[in-house]
Image (tube, helix red, strand yellow):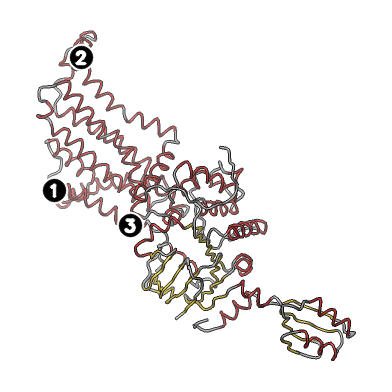
Amino acid sequence: MNSVGRTPEPVIELEGLSVRLGGRPVLHDLNASLGGRAIGLLGPNGAGKTTLLRTLLEFYQPSAGVARILGQSLDNGGKLVRGDIGYMPESEAHIANLTAIRFVRLMGELSGLPPDTALERSHEALFYVGLGEARYRKLGTFSTGMKQMAKLAQAIVHGPRLLMLDEPTNGLDPPGRKRMLDLITDIRDRGETTMLISSHLLADVESVCDEVIILKNGRIVARCDLEAERRANRAFVELELQHPSEEFSLAVQELASEVAIVSELRMKIVLPDAVTVRDLYAAAERHGASIRRLDCKRDSLQDIFLRAMEADNGGV
Amino acid sequence: MAVYEREWRRYEGPITPIRMRFLVVTRFALGEVFSSRLFTAFYVLSLLPSLLALFLIYLRHNVSLLEQMGLTQEFMGALTMTFFQLLFSWQAVPAFFIALIVSPSLIAADLSNSALPLYLARPIDRRDYVIGKMAVLFLLLSPVTWIAGLLIFALQSYLEGGGWWLENYRIALAYLVGHLSWIVVISLLSLAVSAWVRYKPVARGALFGVLFILSGFSEAVNGITGSSVGDLMNLSKAMVSVVQHLFGGFSPSRLPVTANWATLIGTSIISIWLLNRKLRAHEEVR
């Protein structure tokens, strides 16, 4: 069984959730309680990320188990709770002969906004994503990047409590990708909505998410609190000397909480909160040691992801 | 429109009733339909038979106007059932062409660009979506068919007086039941075709084919088998037979009227099944 536990007020709860598609099991007995501001859903292609999102939107029916969103079970309140969800699908999804403003307004009204409010918020959403000047153009004439932004606008127009983004940076050029990540970060930092972001791009997830679930073969194989990881790894340092220095090594062992001497020249150090890198340089100067290289290294999401992928089907 | 806020924010205000949410689909689709001037002109033209009938009935009861025109009340014969039957078909034909023009763009436009997940990720389900799209055809076809028919019947009853409406209530019944049945069947069928055939001209051709090529095929089956069993797949003949039965006229099919109703209901059920098969947020790959 895969289990992930977290906050006192979870936004998404999975209890033994399993999904079969075409007779083939795709998600296996998922158990999780997710409540971060931005939750990343990582995994290789075919791991079940998109299937999980679609199941939460009731596009697919679970073969076993229960899923709850915002405290509402999908069994009896799924339709109602979808009014509080914004969804940006992975694939191209638009209505080509509608203008951007009409498209976003339609989606806003379908989510329950009164017509006047929907129109007002559609203008605002399109300006927010950077399509203000193009809002009266038909979606069929938009570039891939603009369509991606229009998809984000329709997902946020009704101010959802939960925003599900499936591969939001797909097909974007570097400036477009940066713009998309900036927008996601901005929405996250406002703290008014929870985001569930599915992606296979580690850098994207790492830059915007504070919690990560890693899926493999339809199972949760790792859960990572990126905020905690960042805090824990902040003081992890790799150091290499020009020449061996016994005195400097001893000085470092006095300063650091943990020191691993890899060789005469290389050592790995965990610095306590009160000690900074500047103190290491000062110690080197005092003992006549020359520091050749100093890396403030932390356990990257890539390391965590690769470890999870190496693990066989099993728990975290 | 002046845009004051260019930032994203949560919405905490009132929301519209969830049960009526399908009307959003209808309203936006109607807006798209009437964005074409050509269609708007055709729609106005399709009201002409009914307007002409209203004028003729008014003329027939206006003796002074008839005298001015050098006509008598006998100029169009008695207002028999035949007049109303003829008018029915003059209403049904443009209604069919309206459905033929409008329906392929109703669902195909959403499916061809994978917009269906965007609809279904919101608080509407597939049933709401289909009802919303069907309502477009219902709202377009009703004024041209049964509403116009009942207005004409009401005008004739009022001008004729003397319990005319009681003697001819079948006419009103035929307009109501006949046209509503036609609207339901043609709407479901055309939406199903639109869902499966996304290219508009091909969808129109397919709908035309279902009605007319299938008619020819059913006649061939009748000829080969020497029976009327082919009529079971002849939708247009079944519809005409049902309407004739409602008017109390001569049915072109040798099958009993219940068999004609079965054809209409069967077509509707098959159309719903086809819609159910096709209208999914995502297809399962088996």
Horizontally, residue B130 falls left or right of residue B4, namely left
Q: Which residue is mark 2?
A: B62
**Residue lying at the far right of the rendered structure:** A288
Location of residue B176 by image quarter:
top left
Horizontally, residue B16 falls left or right of residue B164, namely right
Quadrant of the snapshot with the C terminus of chain B: bottom left
Image coords of residue A55 (percent x, y): 42, 66
Image coords of residue B203 (percent x, y): 38, 47
Q: Amino acid at mark 3?
A: Asn
Looking at the image, tell me whether mark 1 or mark 3 is earlier in sequence order.
1
Q: Amino acid at mark 2?
A: Asn
Q: Which residue is mark 1?
A: B258
Mark 2: which secondary structure? loop
Image coords of residue A149 (percent x, y): 57, 53
Q: Which residue is mark 3?
A: B276
Q: Give the distance between the C-alpha atoms of the residues marked 1 and 3, in whole angstroms.
A: 26 Å
